Image (tube, rainbow, N blue to C red):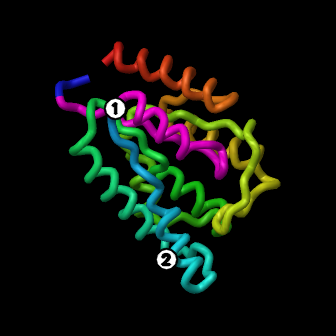
Amino acid sequence: MKKNKVLKIVLFGPESTGKTTLAERLAAYYKTNWVPEYAREYLQKKWDYSKDACSLEDLPIIMKGQSNLEDKLLEKSNRLIFCDTNSVVTQIWSETHFNGYCSKEILYNAKNSNHDFYLLTDIDIPWKKDDLRDRPNERIKMLNIFKTKLDQYKFPYKLISGSLQTRIQKSIKIIDKIILKS
């Protein structure tokens, strides 16, 4: 790792697999920042205002909002930053919710993601309903889609399973090894 480079770790996986909680806990452990999911706030406001779900037109806005939020927090981060999502998730969401369609802009950003490592969160924790989650019966399918995309792009990752404490411990071991190598 070059001096002043911040290692970007993405918490990656289907809905309701503990990404936000893990990002928060890891950021606290490493005394750095985590990037919340821009889409969650954006789409929750849309839902609260008009009961409208995500549209294709929302996806480029979400991707840019996430990138801007990450850039803003990156400047203030200490050696690591934990990203609750990234453009690869936006690509997957587009393809799974809009009959395989994904814009060229989102595809480009996903394929050229500059994140250093992915922690793929397993579906071995209970699914929790909220206004935005919509695939409780497709968890295995969605996990396979997320894993396949990481393999397709040859992005480095490890599957993180188990209780929250187990996930934290496994993640710390993986991240410490990455830091030592850099």
Given the current orientation, which residue lies at the most extreme bottom position? Answer: 50
Mark positioned earlier in the residue sequence (1 or 2)? 1
24 w.r.t. 41: above or below: above
Given the current orientation, which residue lies at the most extreme left position? Answer: 3
Q: Quadrant of the C terminus?
A: top left
Frontmost residue, 182 versus 124: 124
Q: CA distance from mark 1 to mark 2?
A: 36 Å
Frontmost residue, 28 versus 80: 28
For label 2, count other residues whose C-alpha is less than 10 Å away and answer few (under 14), some (14-19) or many (20+): few
Q: Residue at x 82, y 54 (%)?
A: 137
From the image, tell me which residue sits under label 2. 57
Residue 34: horizontal and vertical position, in percent? 39, 43
Q: Residue 31: which numbered mark, if any?
A: 1
**Label 1: element kind:** loop
Decide whether residue 15 is among the magenta residues.
yes
- Please give the range of residues in magenta: 4-31
Q: Amino acid at mark 1?
A: Lys
**Quarter residue 1 falls in:** top left
Q: Residue at x 55, y 42 (%)?
A: 21
Judge left or right: residue 52 versus residue 76. Answer: right
For label 1, count other residues whose C-alpha is less than 10 Å away and answer few (under 14), some (14-19) or many (20+): some
**Quarter residue 60 falls in:** bottom left
Residue 163: horizontal and vertical position, in percent? 68, 30
Q: Residue 59: which numbered mark, if any?
A: none
Residue 39: horizontal and vertical position, in percent? 49, 63
Judge left or right: residue 5 versus residue 125. Answer: left
Q: Amino acid at mark 2?
A: Glu
